[in-house]
Amino acid sequence: MVSDSMLVLLLVCIVAILSFVTYSIRKGNVRLIHKLYFCLSFSLVIWLGACVGIYFTDPGNTPALEVWDALTYLGGPFACTLALLISMVFVAGWEKLPRKCFLLFIPPVITNLLVWTNPLHHLIYRTFSVDNSAIEFGPLMFVTGLFSYIPLMASIVVMITFAVRSKNRLYMWQALFFVLGDLPPMVVNIMATLKLVNVSLVATPLSFALTIVFHGFSIFYFHLLDIKPLALQRVLERLSDCYLVLSDTGLVVDFNRPFYETFGKQYGIQENVFLQNCTKKEGEMGGAFYTLLSSVEACRNSKSNISYEQTVLLEENQETVKKYYMVEITPILVEEEKLGGFLAFFKDVTKVKESMQKLQNSQAKLMEQERLASLGQMVGGIAHNLKTPIMSISGSMIALENLLNECGESLGDPDVTEEDYREIYEEAAGWVEKVREACAYMSDIISAVKGQAVNMSLSETGEFRLEDALKRVFLLLRHELVGNGCKLEVVNSLGQDPLLQGDINSLVQVLNNLVTNAVDAEKAVGGGSITICLEKTETELQIQVKDRGTGVPEEIKRKLFRQMVTNKGALGTGLGIYISNSVIRARFNGRMWVEDNPGGGAVFGIAIPLQYVDLVPQRKEESE
């Protein structure tokens, strides 16, 4: 029976549980584990309420007592199942209860059906009484009791296993409080069912009150939902596509499903199996496995992060697909820098690699288009430049032909002296020298054009004189400069000739672009002088192209090297400066800038680190 002191304790428990649950619900942030905890609390309130009902019921009113007793089964069996679910959610980190978990509620439902229909079959009670000493249990009482013990025992095993595996002090404290909450009702239940001691009717529900206290302490005091395993898993999954957790001995502790699908299936990687003992396959995947093992060992020896890129061949939709992963092995250091294990991150960078390749291809195409556009602009000037030497050669050949004819007609003429023949020879030699000069000039132009027509991806890296690059610029832009009333000057304040490491064709393209822009700027003001200044700082060689044109607006200047912008309207694309900056960075590890020219116009600068520059004496013809 229920005593007066027990009644007070029951009422206090009911009020305390309802107050705490109400406060927690109002506080918000209610998730699955909270909901299960609240269900456990409500089932216990029903149980305790039924005990209060028994207290106020006449002991001789057996049917009413049987109803109150049946209500207690809405608490007991369901409370055990809910305790197990709370443990499973804590360990597995579920945000939503899997459907298969609802199968756990089948035994409590059957137990309640048997209890409520007990007068018809007496399978639970042969003789019913609220006095534990007078109860005579039926044949299924022990079976239904067993179904109550199993969830509690399973909950304890789940929590202890998790605590041992996690080796985390916080999780171990949480697991301890869960176990302490599950132990009292299990012990009391076993003693009541086996009649080991004379247990009061309210002993079992009051023991579950301890479960509510300990579970609530673990969940709310330790902020379980803020730091539960799911949160750590989510962090790992956000940081990586696959992850693998190893102990200090190489034992597989944990991994996520993407890791299993990508790597685990290939080797039979399972929890509680040493990584080095997993099945190894030959070929590409075998290489990935051996790289992982060797990286873990390197991480063990250095106790520092090890990073590398791994190529993996996978079968997807009956096709072999190549994927790229960035792998980082991180040592897990515990107290006093002792190695506790390893965490391996696998980040899928396949799309990044593909995007980078597409970007490189697109940039190469843009650079090639810009080169072709530049060549197209030079075609007119080149054609004009070639006309002069061709006409010179043609005139020289006519003069030579006339001299040959004159020489042939004078043979045998006594009036033609040796001195006359010498004059013919000297004049012919003069015309031949003019042909030689014209051919050399054409050869220089053809070499310059040929160099600029080379594809950007086939750059010729080597040593070259800056003087040679400037000569090509003069040759290629001569017609454009003359046609627009511009003059190109070089001011070398170094006293020496820079010898550069890089691709001469790329630098010529950039200088051509800058000089062409300067010509366009000068053209707007009627032409003028364009100056290429060579200067040196402590760390850089600077090549400055100065014009006295209209200048560059500030809004264009801010975006010039980061976006494809132009102030030429429909006459410009903005590709030239943008690509020029990319070329200087890629080919010379340099940089570009723009500023206002104090005398009006703009100054476009190229800076090349001195480590790529040697200063050599100027050629004699230049110094003279």
Image (spheres, helix red, strand yellow):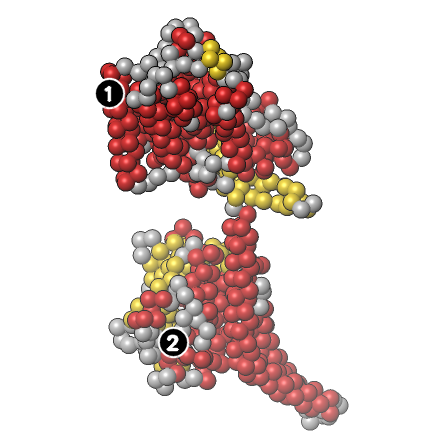
Q: Is residue 220 visible?
A: yes
Q: Quadrant of the C terminus?
A: bottom left
Q: Is residue 48 visible?
A: no
- Assess disc 2: are there few (<14), some (14-19) or many (≥20) residues with their C-alpha within 10 Å of its C-alpha: some
Q: Residue at x 42, y 5 (%)?
A: 196
Q: Is residue 368 left or right of residue 55?
A: right
Disc 2 secondary structure class: loop
Q: Residue at x 47, y 56 (%)?
A: 586
Q: Residue at x 65, y 85 (%)?
A: 397
Residue mark closest to the camera, 2 vs 1: 1
Q: Any mark on residue 609, and which?
A: none
Q: Is residue 107 left or right of residue 50?
A: right
Q: Amino acid at mark 2?
A: Asn
Q: Any mark on residue 8, and which?
A: 1
Q: Residue at x 52, y 46 (%)?
A: 349
Q: Quadrant of the N terminus?
A: top left
Q: From the top left corner, tell me how far across and down residue 503 is, in percent.
A: 51, 59
Q: Any mark on residue 567, and which?
A: 2
Q: From the top left corner, tell me how far across and down residue 326 is, in percent.
A: 50, 41
Q: Residue furthest top?
A: 196
Q: From the top left corner, tell me how far across and down residue 56 is, in percent.
A: 30, 22
Is 128 or 259 nearer to us in this picture?
128
Q: Quadrant of residue 218?
A: top left
Q: From the top left corner, tell me how far across and down residue 357 is, in percent.
A: 55, 54
Q: If you read the primary sequence from the N terminus, does the residue marked by circle 2 or circle 1 appear first?
A: 1
Q: Amino acid at mark 1?
A: Val
Is 229 or 586 nearer to us in this picture?
229
Q: Is residue 412 left or right of residue 480?
A: right
Is 141 or 285 nearer to us in this picture?
141
Q: CA distance from mark 2 to mark 1?
A: 89 Å
The number of numbered badges drawn on the structure is 2
